[in-house]
Image (tube, rainbow, N blue to C red):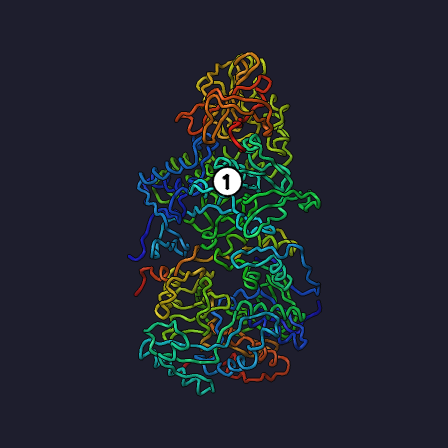
Amino acid sequence: MLMKRYELIVIGAGPAGLCAAIEAAANGMQVVVYDENSRPGGQLFKQIHKFFGSKEHKAKERGFRIGEKLLDEARELGVEVVLNATVMGVFENKEITVMIEDRVEHIKGNEIIIATGASENMLPFPGWTLPGVIGAGAAQTMMNLHGIKPGNKILMVGSGNVGLVVGFQLIQAGCRLEAIIDASPRVGGYGVHASKLARLGVPFYMSNTVKEAYGEGSVKGVSIVEVDKNWQQVAGSEKTFEVDTICIAVGLSPMSQLAKMTGCIMEDSPAKGGLVPVCNEYGETSIPGIYAAGDVSGIEEASSAMLKGRIAGSAISYNQGYLEENIFKENQAKYRSSLEQLREGMFGHKNKGRTDLLNTEEGFEISLNLLENGFLADVEIAHYPGVVSQERRKQGIVPVIECTQNIPCNPCQDACEKGCIKVGQVITNLPIIDGTAKCTGCGMCVAACSGQAIFLVNEDYAPGYATVGLPYEFRPLPQIGDKGIALDRSGKAVGEAEVISIKSAKALDETAILTIKVSEDLSMKARFFKSSKEVSL
Amino acid sequence: MSKPDVIIVGGGVISCAIAYYLAKAKVKVMVLEKEEIGDGGSSRNGGGVRQSARDPREIPIAMYAINNLWPTLSEELGVDIEYHKKGNLRLGKTEEHLRVLQHNVNLGLKAGLELKMVSSAEIHELNPYVSEEVIGASYCPTDGHANPMKTTLAFYKRARELGTQFITGETVKSVILKKGKVAGVKTKENTYEAPLVILAAGMDSRVIANSVGIDIPMQKILLEALITEAQPIMFPQMLGTAAADFYGHQTDHGSFVFGGSTSLENYVSDVEGRETKSITAPYICRAILGYFPCLSKVNIIRTWAGFIDESADHVPVLSKVDEVPGLVLTCGFSGHGFGISPAIGLLISELIIKDKPSLSLEAFKYDRFKPKG
Amino acid sequence: MNKITDRTFTGEEFVSHRDDSVIICRCEEISKGEIRRAVYDGMRTMSEVKRYVRAGMGLCQGQTCSRLVKNIIAKELGLKPGEVEIPTPRSPARPVSMEIYANDGMKK
């Protein structure tokens, strides 16, 4: 037999591909997964930040660990995962050709899942071909997989989650993030991601685009310019930055070439990120037996990709006779409702692109300052349910949760043994602090919050002083006794601060709890610490 | 816009060339194409511009094109169509191959073509990259190659500038007859009127001709080609083999374009789309490496497929249809239309304007197909 | 792409833009101006533009530039980007050397 035949071929060993393979293999199918990279896990392996969602969505786990777990699970179930295997084409009769080492193999499948993910969009501007202009994803790969700093002084273009998250990781890697710009008037990603940057002092320039990158031989600087309502450049509004790197984070496009090659019906969907195969609810394309899962069928994030993979894997198991109908229907209902959960909230499908939302689902005012500048204004803080009254704060240590947008996420609730934090059944709810519960100051909630939006505030510390416990993911860790300044949500220095404790533990998973002592009037202002030992952050 | 004098069905190189020469002579032309300009064989062929190894009926047309039209076409159309007249080496590895090649040489010489057999030493002088296994070749110094996509689009661009009306997205379904004469065509949604209709739509010409009781015996065959990444310029000639396993050339860009066939084509071509088969490109690569082992590390960037309209006797139908006044057929090029396309354009325009093409087209009449014996 | 398009030349002049020199197709180094000029010359689809100026024909097969070329064509023609069809990708999805391609175990 010249062509090897599997029951299921999965193309791509990212979150969607691996979850599809796991699902099918768990039901008894013979599965092979091909990935062109030397490391599987797709985007997961370079994602060092904690995921959102709930426990079933792997919330508060770091991307790369999820990747490792998925791979182990797949292997244990007997899935053949072939790396450094580039699928070259999908042909008629569900045949693929795959390049492995020095040869081409013809492989046939009873069913095929295309889970090839997405690639970064580019933004052309004068000077964009200079060395130093790179995609944010590429920068992330450089830093997190290869341990290389992409540059020293960086401009981030794009304020969606990719731009915000990678921006933060650039600073963690020791780079200097000069600014974040976005042609849109509002920050596109989660407010909490933006806040992480703002309190480090990174300025946000909304309604700005790159005018020109310049430099001899490589990027030496960039000029940005404002754009008006019609996306036209406003003359005279130029600003220049001295940078050696410009990171482009202007969205992803599905890598749907293999799907299109099959001849299945495609649609160009801006909502889904570009050209995607038209699929039914199980991810099956117009060609029976050929499925698409994950970003390739519509850009979302890894948590959604994992569920889409499961949905496809389960449908295929049922088609191939490995799953009873009632169990198949049960699984589908479970996965679908989980997927719908992730699609709720301010950034979900229904609300995508909306700029007219004024209130959260519960009726709290959405912070305009957060959307336009990247941080909550001082006066806005007290309004949210995650912030207890001053009266309660004066009684002793209590978590203060500055989570002000409906995002499907609830690890904070599970983190607190004492029941201080409530999110409820609807996981997009803003977290509420139960002021009557007894906070022990353990810091588990601080570390559990993937948005790093929880602070332990103690206004009962000492006369005239308060302490603020904050999430700290930089290295080296400050030492007890270190003196420095406290920065507010906008990154402005607001007063002196001294480190009184620094807590690291396995359970905190690399998020240290840094507690600083500040004057009591700063208890609800101080949100970051800069040691006087540091030259600059 | 007023009624055109001529409607050409199909937007490939043949149509665009005919449109150009007609437009040059101030004839009002409308071209109706179902998809996009040059989307058929015109953009998918290997770009060969050759006289050798053609059916003797075609050789005079090919010679005419190479002697009179190709050399100045870039200038005339205002687009560099990358035409090169650097010869054609058809390679052989066995005695049987050499016999096949000699036969072609004889045919070519009879038609007045400069064509000869060359020795292994001569081959290596012309092309030092050929494998040592090659024992002989036929060589035609006046053959060459061009860029088929640019040629098609250049004819299109110039014809358009001269006033030809090109409409895409229109699938012609049938020819309209009124009072026994051609009056126009019907598309899916519209009707277009003209007293003269030329069918230059490859395989699709057949079903349209059927609508007025004319048939052209053709079959569609899916052929494939591939292209490599750019390489430093290595060979200027067009290349082929006696075994007919591959052919191709190196383009101005530096990439190599190669085509070839597995011999299974006749049995796997009954498909709708132009998807490539999984086994063809590997086969073509093996064939190429059998003659040019030096290309082993060169990367293939892309493969593609296209249909040829193979006529029953492997040469086109180029003919007024006497029994349907106003109908002209220019199809069935059987995979070698590109090389003669400028000449076809000119000859057909002459046929239409003064009923006297510079070369006789008698051998290409539509009613020539007869049973054997 | 079944939209009926009349491509008759209306005789207007080509208008240069300030940013015509920005490279769009990095693999083949094709500028925005060349793409705009192709549309002016009568090219109406991505495939036609590709075949005329080579934008999208390079090593990455349009992975980087397809979206950008599409947007430029759409803008020139007053269309929504979604109305401009992307050409069909073909195997191999990534470049493969001739000797590896040849080694598929199907030799007679």
Amino acid at circle 1: Glu
Residue at 55% across, 66% down: B38
Instruction: State whether residue B373 appears in this view.
Output: no
Q: Nearer the viewer, residue B272 or B326?
A: B272
* Element under disc 1: loop
Q: Position of residue A375 (x, y in %)?
A: 60, 30
Give the answer, above or below, for where C22 lies relative to B359: above
Query: Residue A152: x and y, percent?
Result: 52, 41
Q: Nearer the viewer, residue B352 or B63?
A: B63
Q: Position of residue C100 (x, y in %)?
A: 36, 59
In the picture, residue B65 is in which quadrant? Answer: bottom right
Instruction: Judge whether A511 appears above or below A184 on screen.
Output: above
Residue A170 appears in the picture as rendered: yes
Give left or right: position of A105 versus B274: left
Please determine whether, in this image, residue A265 is positioned above or below residue B142. above
Nearer-the-camera pick, A480 or C89: A480
Within 10 Å of disc 1 (Cα), the crowding (few <14, some 14-19, many 20+) is some
Q: How many marks?
A: 1
Circle 1 sits on which residue? A300
Query: Residue A357: x and y, percent?
Result: 63, 32
Q: Chain of mark 1?
A: A
Q: Quadrant of the N terminus of chain A?
A: bottom left
Q: Quadrant of residue B261?
A: bottom left
The furthest residue to the left: A1
Looking at the image, which residue is at 35% across and 65% down?
B286
